[in-house]
Image (spheres, rainbow, N blue to C red):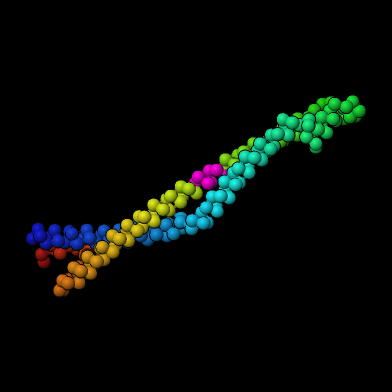
Amino acid sequence: MSTSRLHDDLLQGFHEEKKLIREQLDVLDPMAVSLRKPVAQRLLSKGLLIFYEILCYLLSVAMLLPVIFINHIYPFHLLNVLRSREIYTDRLGIADMNNLYFSVAGLLVIIAILFFMLARLVRKMRLKNDVLNLAGKHIKTLVGQHLKRKAVLDGIEQRHFQELPGNNDLLDPPPADEHPDWKRDV
């Protein structure tokens, strides 16, 4: 009698494992397909992100250079000329000329900070893409292992359950509350 229960428990475990493998494949396979990209597409995307990151860092530095050399660069040196000549300061006022001068310098600094922040965001995006690629690779490995296990389970099912005469009802295990050994005597 205990052999029958062991047999039933093993069959129940077999069917639960087969069901679990099927459910995990239903979840993991679409994820693996959506996360994986061809190598050429991934390298192009990564290359463009690196290019944008470097470009943003360079633009950030390029926005700081006019602030440092504001008196020597063409469009900005006019602010210094306006500030230093009495004809302009008498008409516009020295306070307004200084406000204009420092406002332009402040805007350039703000633009430099924004380009730097944009470069950091592009870097984070590039690193997240690397993590997603790695996750896709590992999920693909898991799907492959699950498919191998499913093939083994299908082989066992075909080999053993088809050979048993009159045991086709074992392919679908009974619910736990309808176990054959637990039937009530009527």
- Quarter of the image with the N terminus in it: bottom left
Q: Is residue 154 visible?
A: yes
Instruction: Locate residue 73, reporting x and y percent.
Output: 78, 34
Please provide the residue range marked out in magenta. 122-128
Q: Is residue 120 above or below residue 161?
A: above
| Closer-to-camera residue (91/35) | 35
Residue 19 visible to an observer of this rendering: no
Confirm whether the magenta stretch covers residue 142: no
Q: Is residue 123 magenta?
A: yes
Q: Residue 140: x and y, percent?
A: 39, 56
Does the magenta stretch mainly form a helix, a strand or a loop? helix
Q: Position of residue 32 (x, y in %)?
A: 42, 57
Q: Residue at x 46, y 56 (%)?
A: 36
Q: Residue at x 22, y 65 (%)?
A: 156
- The answer to whether 48 appears left or right of 84 in the picture is left
Q: Please report the residue visible at 53 percent of the width from the left and 43 percent of the height from the top.
A: 124
Above or below, 15 against 66 in this view is: below
Name the residue at the left extreme.
1
Which percent across, then down, holds residue 136? 43, 53
